[in-house]
Image (tube, helix red, strand yellow):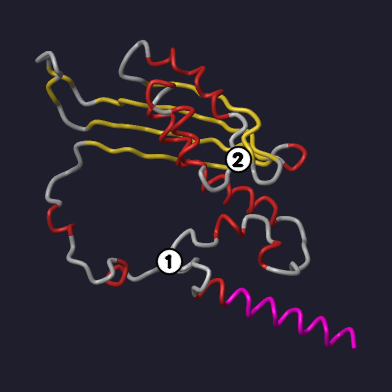
Amino acid sequence: MKNVPEAESGGGMSSLKEFIREGPVHSRNMDIRTFPAEHGRVVVEGRLHDERFVCGTRWDGETEAPRTVHRIVVRLLVGDWPPTILDAEAEMLDVPHTLCPTTLDSIRNVVGISISPGYGKEVQERLGGVRGCTHMAHLVGAMGIAVLHGVWTERSRHPRTPPESLEAIPGFSQLKDSCRLWREDGPIIREMREGLKALQNKDSERGE
């Protein structure tokens, strides 16, 4: 893992850390893990945890003590290529309203979505707003890129030969143009193309 010195990680911008002089009033943590399943599939489990650390006042004037606001768990069964959600389930362990669990069935709306360009929009259209739960939609949306990393990691456990082209690499289309460094003419893809060409030249020399 390549660590970036703290002085360089901000890109030369002024530090907003100077404004932080007290403890947090709220935190939202998400933990997303991928587990191998049968037939080359994976189960991806996402957990969302909202915590309030200070007393507050409700809309009705009542005092509200610090507490856990949300603990929501979503599990997705993912398989095929492009990776596709084959099954989904959710749990609400802590929620702010007794009616929140009535939205749990809406997690089934995401079954059939592929982890490909447009994934986030599709999740919002099927699960966001009045169609489901905004917090489950936020979690499932964040799970998309984690699904790809999990699938790639699981597949990397098995030996494989270099591809004929970068475009033949499963998931390359999702990576290309996904950020400044992964742009088509950027340094990472250029380095990969040069490396693949060098490997192909070596194989060609061996065959002579």
Q: Is residue 61 magenta?
A: no
Q: Which residue position holds label 1?
A: 180
**Mark 2 vs mark 1: which is more N-terminal?**
2
Q: Is residue 169 left or right of residue 2?
A: right
For the point 69% across and 39% down, which residue is it? 79
> Along the line of sight, which residue is nearer the eye, 206 or 170?
170
Compared to residue 177, the image places residue 186 above or below, namely below
> Which residues are the magenta region?
191-208
Rendered position, 11 above or below 84? below
Across and down, in percent, residue 121 comes to 46, 39
Q: Which residue is outermost to the right?
A: 208
Name the element at disc 2: loop
Residue 189 sits in quarter: bottom right
Q: Nearer the viewer, residue 166 or 13?
A: 166
Residue at mark 2 = 114
Residue 75 placed where, x, y %?
A: 56, 31
Amino acid type at circle 1 is Arg
Where residue 129 appears, as percent x and y from the top left, is 37, 25
